[in-house]
Image (spheres, rainbow, N blue to C red):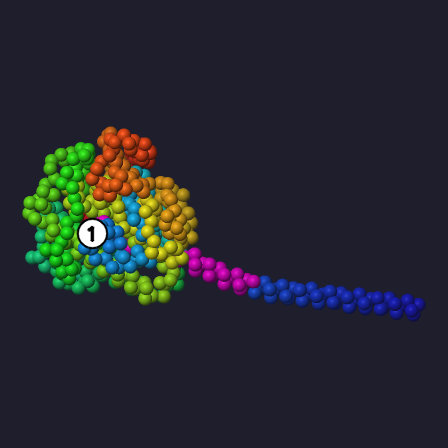
Amino acid sequence: MTYMKFETCLETNLLSNKKKKTMRKKSLLIYCTVLIGIGFLTILNSCKSEVKEIERPNVLFVAFDDLNDWEGCLFGHPQTITPNINRLAEKGVLFTNAHCAGTMCCPSRASMITGLRPTTTGVYKNTDTPNSLYKEKQTLNKHFKENGYFVAGAGKILHGFHYEENDWHEFQAKPKGKNIVGNRSNPNMENATIVSGNIMWGSFSSPDSLTFDGSNADWVSERLNRDHDKPFFLACGIFRPHIPWFNPEKYFDRFPLEEIELPIVNEDDLDDVPLSGKNIAYSITNFTMDDDLNNYEENEEHEMMKRDSLWEYAVRAYLASVSYADAQFGKLLDALENSKYADNTIIVLWSDHGWHLGEKEHWRKATLWEEVTRVPLIIYAPDKATNRRSSQPASLIDIYPTLIELCGLPIIDELEGESLVPQLIDPDTKRIIPAISSLTPEFHSVRNEQFRYISYGNGQEELYDHSLDPREWANIADNPDYSEVKEKLKGFVPQEAKEHTKGKNNKKNEKL
């Protein structure tokens, strides 16, 4: 009995010790697991923070107005002075074949901010009214704001300096303060030359800091140097070189009048252009008048420029405006490069459309030719290609999906553009869809890497081969050798285009 009790007691103790050892092992295992888990979570959170920082870059978004290809990097005019735009082109990817979707301020900016074509929105000209469009659609700035970005802007981003207050944290449409020279003002009007409509030019003595664009650039620059606790989207609209060409005197001084070179033109350029195209060339109101497309008379504005020997003066004033606008952009570049955000900020530079200075006897925007549809577009993304050029067709409606992809924002299915990220990685990556520009529900241009096709919806058409004819002097639409090319491009012409969107209109803004 004693032996049995001892054996039973020993067995019980052994089991108890075994259980204790097992419990200790389990405790040690749990403790180690917790430590490993904490360490893993710490590493994971650190990685997440790093990934978040990489995936959520800042954006500096800069829009010019009426800027054609007269930048040094685009070789549009041999005398242009644009060191800051050139500086950005060396940092990023320059899209040498980029085009606007609408050929005036209002439709181009409406299409860019919504990512939708004029044929979808019904906004084709400056008298069309997109106000309800901005409220109903997820605009670019609204998308950034709703996804955690600090969103602020100044100047002309939308036509008429329109902005939805709730879609921005801060916005300065027009500079505040004494002695600011307005975007249409000249304190020294005795120096002004007035031609027709709102085409005028002249110098004044105020410093850049007291000008419309200079003040807005300073406003955005100050925000670039703030401490931000979340990523930012900062937009700056530079009004020049929009008319009137009023600029500080020093910018006119850069271009001595006696040395001005005129654009290279063909005096017979309109001979092979169909009647609808000539109507557009003769227009001097940007289609703000209902009978504008019935103008069959000789272009009075162009004839006056030649008759009164004003052509050199106008080219000089435009060059001065481009140089002034470039200097204001330089403020933004300097502010960013001197900030702590320089290595994690995407820069997008674009213009709403180009501008004719006598080419095809035209002196304004609102055409379907290269001078108007082609725009400067430069995108710098810190981890993508630098100092490269892409000749692939691009559209301003491609900016929206590009920024969505670069910044990791939620995708919007209804956007009609295509991301340019493949071209930011490899600028030679081919794009299948050409750039489409629309002037009315019937008038459209289709531009691919080599050709431009124009359809007026009435059987009249134009076709140009840019490999042989970069200035679009020879309309080859009736040449049978190009019939296959023409038919292919014709397939991209919008077949169902929304009519003009009409509503209350601010007459004052029609000229903007």
Name the residue that disc number 1 marks: 77
Residue located 29% across and 61% down the image:
333
Judge left or right: residue 278 versus residue 15.
left
Query: Total number of numbered labels?
Result: 1
The image shows residue 382, relative to residue 269, as above or below, that is below
The image shows residue 207, relative to residue 300, as above or below, that is below
Picture coordinates of residue 500, whole percent (x, y): 25, 37
Judge by depth and name the residue closer to the eye, 288 or 171.
288
Q: Determine which quarter of the picture holds residue 59.
A: bottom left
Local crowd at mark 1 within 10 Å, few (<14), some, or many (≥20)?
A: some
Magenta-highlighted residues: 40-68
Picture coordinates of residue 485, whole percent (x, y): 31, 34
Q: On the rendered image, what quadrant is the N terminus found in?
A: bottom right
Residue located 31% across and 57% down the image:
90
Picture coordinates of residue 207, whole percent (x, y): 17, 64
Q: Residue furthest right?
A: 1
Judge by depth and name the residue closer to the eye, 136 or 197.
197
Judge left or right: residue 29 versus residue 224.
right
